[in-house]
Amino acid sequence: MPLRVFTPEIDGWIVVVGALAGAACSIPGTWLLVRGRLMAGDAVTHAVLPGIAGAFIAFQSRDPLLMLAGAAISGIACLLLAVVLERALRVDRGAALGVAFSAFFAIGLVLIVQGADRVDLDPSCVLYGALELAPIDSVSFGLFAPGGPIISIPRAVPTLLVALAACAIASWVLFKELRLGAFDPGFAAAIGARPLLIDLLLAALVAMVSVAAFESVGSILVVALLAALPAAARMLSSRVGTMLLLGPGLAIAASVAGHFVAVAVPPLFSDRLGDTSSAGTMALMSGLIFLACALLGPERGIVLRVARQRQLQERIAREELLALLWRSQERGLAVEVQDIRRHFVTMAVGRRASGRAVRSLSQRDWVTSSNDRLALTTSGEREAARVIRSHRLWESYLAEQASIRPDHVHATASRLEHVTGDDLAAQLATETNATLDPHGQQIPRE
Amino acid sequence: MIDWTTQVVVVTVSLLGAAAGAAGTFVLLRRRALLGDVMSHAALPGVALAFIVGTGIGMGRSLPALAIGAAATALAGAWSVSWIRRQTRLRDDAAMAIVLGCFYGLGVALLGIVQSMPQGQQAGLTHLLLGHVASMTRVDLWSVLLGATVVLLFVVALFKEWRLLCFDEAFTRSIGRPATRLDALLMATLGVVIVVGMQAAGLLVVVALLITPAAAARACTVRAGWMVAIAAAIGAASGAGGALLSSSAPDLPAGALCVLVACAAFGIALCVGPAEGVLWRGLRRWRLEARVRREHLLRAMWELSAPSAGPARDRQALLARTPVSVASLLQRRTWSGPRLQALIRREVRMGNMRWGGAHDRVSLTPPGAAEARSVERIHRLWEEYLTRRADIAPSHVDRDADVIEHVLGPELVAQLERDLDRRGGGALA
């Protein structure tokens, strides 16, 4: 079955609403992330339920402002309860949050079931959201201009824009306070920045975005956007300001990719399947974006780190091999490939590593091999001398200056020799001023 | 009389509560209380996937398949949390929130597919979230019975190992216990609770029963064994209580009632729990303060009544007869007149002091003088110790000794005495 045609009026708006929700969530999410309180976001998004239901029941209206107020009140109340349980009553932080939000959520369910005759509020709608329905919701709430040209935009767009603007303004105005409270709460309290007040403001922001977004992406999916997008930004940068700017960009990517997957993937399996929930796939995509950033990120990316580790391992294996060859030549012994394997196995380095080290040395023309015997070339000798020199210099230094017994210095020197540059070796030479190491062997000159 | 359906529900939910309470205690003690929350949300995609695959190969809605799917993704979620924590520099809460949100998103997307399948409408998978405690079937009873038995067996069999793991993971490793495997077993147990619980009672109930009874038990005792037992009991009681309440008020959701009963138990435990309960903590604090005030009064009497030197025993005898004016006592410390009066009245009642003159003077009785002497002695010992051993300037030791003398026990005082004697303690009070 061919992919169904994308229509700007429907698919375009879905992507816009999703991106706006993601962007609005990413800002308070970034602050929660740097403050180590992301699960509080989870709690608040659950805890808005009784506020929303209470507002419905009390005022019999779907007025977004009333809902917002109700949700903000119950969200903040839940967080306050958790803070009191944690700080004053010494309950474990996670347990305090868990108890508080499950209680609020249960109350919300009771309220919804009680008021079911009077209000049409389906709890699963609150939980899942319906991003697909966002474009349809524009007519009934067609906002601008009775009489004039009717511009119909989804109701979610202005709501989310307001939420996004509020988060952006709050972050802009209180940037210093928020950042300070995140990294040094003790100092923040000492200079009178009121960390508790900032926490509550943050709770209010989270409550606001989850209410603004719950109709379009569902209250629990808000958690994915709150957590995964800022965490992805964190993988790309360590600066809070940069993270705040990256978040909305990643949100656009997650929204586009999410909606595409929701439309394109189900038909691949069966013709009868329609689109799935774009909100769900958007959450999934934000998770995958996080995964990609964690793997490929600069500085701390997992791929980069593993590659660096690998490089280091190979360099150490090369240097060990050079040192082995030098020592054997010093004693006038021939070295065969077998010996090298055995040496590497006793050092708990695998066979393959030893093979790689031999290959990489011959590629550099540092060793020549004939009849399975290895010998250092002139350039190889120069490299090997450097390794041996730093090893023996360290041995002398440790024995003389650090008063370590001569029969104990070898192991430490073996580790240090691989991380010693020329400058350090020169400094060691001036410190020790030795020509022989503690075992009476010659220290090679530069 | 309670009808048969209600009996099934009560038994099932209380078994579930017992298992969740027992397993949740260990998770709480490992400071990962919200992991149950994360894992139960992460179970959703497994359920949906099992349904889709099951329908695809013609098995339809098979309960074991759904359970296996749920357990698989729940454990994958738990593993992802620890992977993120190990591989990135993100903290626990961030790892948990990412896994919770994204697995749940996948679940919602898969449920969207289920709903657009022709068989999907009657799958009833949405029950997994909000629960359908009231419409529980006998299959649920058996699966919960099986799950709870497995969980409780694990808890009994691995209690010692898990306790060790909770309190000192590094030590567990160092004595050669397989900490990683023990942790994985704990996660698996949690997975069992979540899987059987979600099918029988819904996600909300499972999450709440994993966290709340354990937190309540934490307030009741500091011993891990009792904690597990109490958490299991509270879990069972809140399950049964919620189910019974909802049978008498059928228009209330039973799952939410179980949660609220558990929260009420938590509230009560937090107030009157013997270990961390607010009431007992307050009482202990109040007793300490009362003792401190009383010791202050006795020392003030000692200092005022006979400032001159001399062997302490003679002073004690002298002191018992020397009256001290209340006005001068009032100036010794920052205490209000009425409070001082109350303190003196209490000591008079206890026979440690007696009034002199027109209630404006007091003196110590012989037993009171003996006690004042011992209080003064402890104060002096601490002053000596702080001056000689802790190198604190003599002008500062009085205040420091004042703080410390009330809170350290008699064994420590005896040791202090020996310590100072060895170094030539001199004539102390």
Image (cartoon, helix red, strand yellow):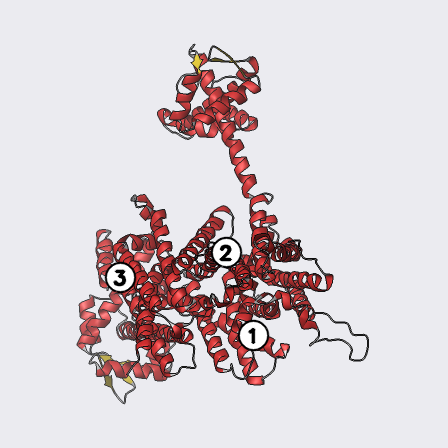
Outermost residue, front direction?
Answer: B58
**Residue B334 location, x and y as percent?**
39, 76
Q: Residue shown at 70%/72% (left/top)?
A: A138
Q: Nearer the viewer, mark 1 or mark 2?
A: 2
Q: Chain of mark 2?
A: B
Say if mark 2 contacts mark 3, CB within 8 Å: no
Which residue in the structure is indicated by mark 2?
Answer: B99
Tag 1 secondary structure = helix
Sequence order check, earlier mark of 2 and 3: 2
User: Image quadrant of residue A254?
Assistant: bottom right
| Image quadrant where one finds the C terminus of chain A | top right
Cα–Cα gap, marks 2 and 3? 32 Å
Q: Check the image and report above or below for B243 versus B429.
A: below
Which residue in the structure is indicated by mark 3?
Answer: B225
**Residue B428 location, x and y as percent?**
24, 61
Tag 2 secondary structure = helix
Which residue in the structure is indicated by mark 1?
Answer: A71
**Residue B160 location, x and y as percent?**
26, 54
**Residue B163 location, x and y as percent?**
30, 55
Tag 3 secondary structure = helix
Q: Tell me: B107 left or right of B172.
A: right
Regarding residue A437, the answer to whether it shows in the image is yes
Q: Chain of mark 1?
A: A
Nearest the eye: B375 or A292 = A292
Give, as a three-letter code, the residue at label 2.
Val
Crowdedness near tag 1: few (<14), some (14–19) or many (≥20) residues, C-alpha within 10 Å? many
Cα–Cα gap, marks 1 and 3? 40 Å
